[in-house]
Image (cartoon, helix red, strand yellow):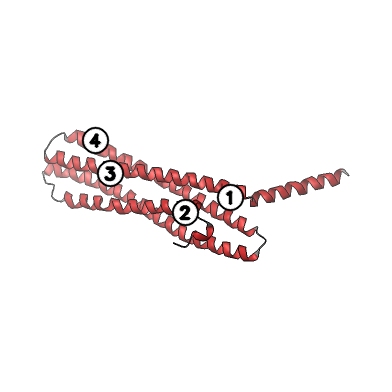
Amino acid sequence: MFKKISLLLIVALVSTSCWKDKSPEDLIRLKDKFKSTVSSFEKKKETANKNVTKGLETLNALKSALEDTKNEDKEFAKVYGDWEKVNKRVVNLNKEYEDLKEHASNLFNAMETQTNSLSDATSRKTLNSAIEKARTKYNGTLANTSKAIEKLRLLHGDAVEVVKALEVAAALNSFDNINDQMKSIEGRVDGIMQELNLAVVESKKLYEKKITELGED
């Protein structure tokens, strides 16, 4: 009798565990976690954008100060400090991107698990097709996001190079060659931020739209 009761308890526990893996509650939890990560990524993107904008402002201020030979040491210290903040924001943004990628993968896997637990074969086929299409599209967005973050990293490196060039230019009192470099840096910012904005937009669709709508755009 005791053995029978023990066996029934084991079966019940296994059944509960299996149901937990397929439970809609798990999908909801993962969706909420992903939503929170998207929000965090968006905030860090905005912070990075503000720091880049400030860095460009101080870079231009540095150039003006050097041309006027005023407050050189103070301006150099300020611009190096601002671009160091940019570097930190890029690092933070990349960490958030890795979380975004991981949580998106977990969410898609949960969608597939939930779909495969359905008894209707037609529904399973339709939903799995939609999920795969959405996953492929979103993975493309993630790849572009990674490239955008790398572009931001390169932008930081180029900006620091401009500051170093300005130090040389200040010694030689010649700033003509710096202008094109600064224009190049300024001209790249909007494009990078647009790519990062797209990552936020596409990420939000994963919890705002139905599964069958995700790959339609």
Instruction: From the top left corner, tell me how far across and down residue 61 is, in percent.
Output: 19, 40
Q: Can the viewer see residue 95? A: no
Q: Is residue 84 above or below residue 142?
A: above
Q: Nearer the viewer, mark 4 or mark 1?
A: 1
Q: Upstream in the sequence, badge 4 or badge 1?
A: 1
Q: Nearer the viewer, mark 4 or mark 3?
A: 3
Q: CA distance from mark 4 to mark 1?
A: 50 Å
Left or right: where 56 falls relative to 107? left
Q: Upstream in the sequence, badge 3 or badge 2?
A: 3
State which quadrant residue 166 falls in: top left
Q: Three-letter amino acid code at disc 1?
A: Leu
Write down the residue under mark 1: 27
Write down the residue under mark 2: 205
Marks 4 and 3 in Cβ contact (< 8 Å): no
Q: Is residue 145 above or below residue 130?
A: above
Q: CA distance from mark 2 to mark 1?
A: 16 Å
Instruction: From the top left corner, tell me how far across and down residue 13 is, in percent.
Output: 74, 46
Secondary structure of the residue carrying tag 1 is helix
Q: Nearer the viewer, mark 4 or mark 2?
A: 2
